[in-house]
Image (cartoon, helix red, strand yellow):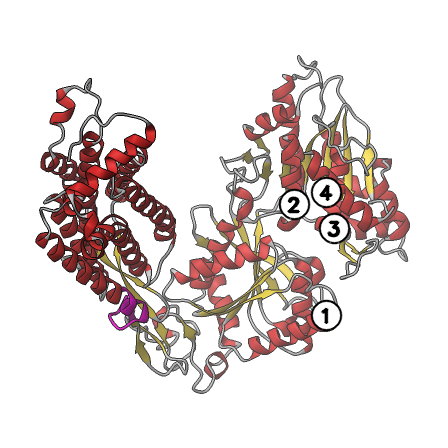
Amino acid sequence: MFLMGLFFMSVFHSSFGENSLLHAYYHGDIIIGGLFPIHLKTNRTNTSGPLSCSDYDVQMFLRSQVMIYAIREIKLPNITIGYDIYDTCGDVSLAVRATLQLLNNQSDPKSCLLPSEPQMKVVIGERYSEVSIAVARIVALSSVAQISYASTSKFLSNRFKFPTFLRTVPSDKYQTRGIVELVKTFLWQTVIIVGSDDEYGLFGSDSLEDTFSQDTNTCVEFVQILSADFMTNNSQTQTELTELLEKIKNSSAEAIILFTKDTNAEIILEAAIRHKVNRTWIASDAWSSSPKISAMPDIKLAGDVFGFIFKQKEVPGFKDYVMSMFNGTENALLKDYLMQNPLCSNQSVEGRKKCLASYIDQDESYRIYLAVQVIGEGLRRLLKCDNHQCEHSSKFTASELLSEIQRVNFNVSTNNVSFNSDGDRRMGYDIVYWNKSEFKQGAKIETIGEYSPDGKINVPLYLFKNLINDTVSAYNCSKTCGAGYEFQSEGKCCRSCVACVIGEFSPGNSSDCKPCSERQYSSEKLDQCLNKTDEFFRWLDPFSIILCSLAATGIIITVVFAVLFAINLGTPAVKAVGGYMCFLELLSLLAGFCLTFTFLDRPTQNLNCVGLPLFGIVFTLCISCILANLFQILLGFNFDLTIGPWIKKLNQPLVLVTVVSGIQVAVSVSWLIFNPPIPQEMEGSTTILHHCEMTSFGYFSAMLVYNGCLALICFLFAFKGRRLPDLYKNASLITISMLLFMVMWIIFLPLYLTMSGKYKPAIEGAAILTSCFSILFSHLAPKFFIILFRKELNQESAITEYIRKHYELKGLPVIGTQH
């Protein structure tokens, strides 16, 4: 907490200078914080310097007064509730600075250390998801509850990252589903998605694209993400805006979804009016009820606007409170409004009151009111208050209040207020339409239906017919599709456009766009269906040729070793690697090299997908042979007469190999019988990936863990015997081979689990080849070299002499030797 505070405060001190944030404070036993973007913009540039705010928003000012009004309604016996409300200007940096000052109990804002228990116990805000995410990370350090009235990003539902965040609005995941249902209701077949480079726009546009991809009847022509500084008026953003409008004008889309904040939407629609880009627009909740945008002159030139807003309700008594000029109350935000930004100043006093009251909204204001009511209910539960007294004092921790707020379940009028496990409210949306027929300049925002929490769109039939006639008749077929211009979509090939939908509501009458088959996609010119390319690890792939060459080399070397060892079977060098048991080891290595070929070509259940289960068997056989060899070496060079005869009876290599290998055989055979890897197809936009699907991670884990344990046992035995008087250094060489095997599979496992694509089988084959070569060259190749080039060492006398010198150097008598 100290380091985070140090970082933020050092940044703010250098960036903001001595500028103070606009805020209103009222002392109380309990302080409720508030974060509101009363100004919508800052003068932020690429260079450092003090920030100032611009674009005063009267509606946001009134919403801050809703919070004050609602706090005054909370009556707790002998306890006063205060507030500390900041103007964040919709800027992340300013909001973080305001949050730190809230947590610092009005102390020196340059202080680096956050208090362990701040006086502020809960904060209401912020409006934008991007800002709320930054605030949520900070207040969580002190377990302070944060209740947002407008941040809808589904990212904020993550309890692990944002444990203290709650909101009186639903997550965007419900809104995006509603937008998709609206598109389907109006039979629109192509859409454009425009989002913004922030958490709200990015998560919303991604969710929309994912949901549309599951609907084969709707295609997304393109997705445009606005730059982070889109609202700043510079040459770069003007170029971006011009390019976006040009793409929209040349598109075949029947609706453009603007999932971004209101400031961005205002810029786009102003430009659409100037350039006479007449389309159907779908507004997200961030701007669907914006009085500023709906009142723009000539808004009808931009086309029709549909939108989603949360269920609206009037804050009881607030309009009268505003008309009374706030009942004579005073606060810094109100003073700033009256002195700097008064509305309708040329009208009478009564006219100014009515003018201000006309800006009261019924969506965000009511959700702010609910947030305060939630806090009041949480306090009553925590302090055990009735109408006369509170059993507990106002000395409590923020985490205690958070726990009570998370559990609230009560009614405000007819509305139930509670939070689910993600801190969200589950509620429906109203669907609005901007009616321009009643106004010469602006538009009237009218509710035409609703989207219920169970996922259904409800629009009256007569209204639906009128709207669809109005919207569809605005475009004839040449405008919708263009002459010879077809819809572009994944998995769909549209050939021509026929009669428009006027009065008919069957999707089949809208166009004769014919979907390509499941294994086809549209060509670039959109005039034919092309077959998707089959992708798998082919024989002629360069990587495949390398693996095959290495596997063939391993097979030849293994056969040569086997022939040479058979010719020299009775010699000490062959006996040192297990005698006749070495042929079992060579057989398992030969099988391992051959298994590499099972990972090539199109997967089949009978061959390609059995590679890993069979590798488990053959490599266990190999390691068990090495383990038996190690056991021989350890007993052969141990002259301790106290060793019991039962231990020496274990020196039966064939029995040891059979038992150890039999366990792995049981695991791998069960795997192949009950839950084997199976061939699967994964369809992309233009390709079909053929791969083996691992249906049982349990069997795969058991196989690897068992082989890993055997390798570890061999490694420990070999490491223990590395100082034995062994002329051929078997123990040391086995130590190296087992170490290589374990390191290889530690590297391979995360690659295998995270990788996808046609080269995944190549990784499996490379891991098997590396394992086989590590044993072939570390354990067996040195004996091959001795047999061919150091024949003097392949004698009994050489071994005896080596042992004698070993013990003489240690000053010990030579008791005897065993071979």
N-terminal label among 4 and 1:
4
Question: What residue span does the magenta drawing correspond to?
Answer: 534-547
Residue 297, labelled with which disc? 1
Callout 4 touching callout 2 (CB < 8 Å): no
Question: Mark 4 highlights which residue?
Answer: 7
Q: Is residue 541 magenta?
A: yes
Residue 319 seen in render: no
Residue 59: assigned label = 3
| Amino acid at dot 3 | Gln
The number of callouts visible is: 4
Q: Secondary structure beneath disc 2?
A: helix
User: Foreground residue, 396 or 93?
Assistant: 93
Amino acid on which disc 1 is placed: Pro
Q: Nearer the viewer, mark 4 or mark 1?
A: 4
Give above or below for 108 relative to 538. Answer: above
Q: Tell me the amino acid under the disc marked 4.
A: Phe
In front of the other: label 3 or label 2? 2
Q: Residues within 10 Å of mark 4 (few under 14, many from 20)?
A: few
Q: CA distance from mark 4 to mark 3?
A: 34 Å
The answer to the question of whether label 4 and label 1 lie on touching residues, with beta carbons closer than 8 A, is no
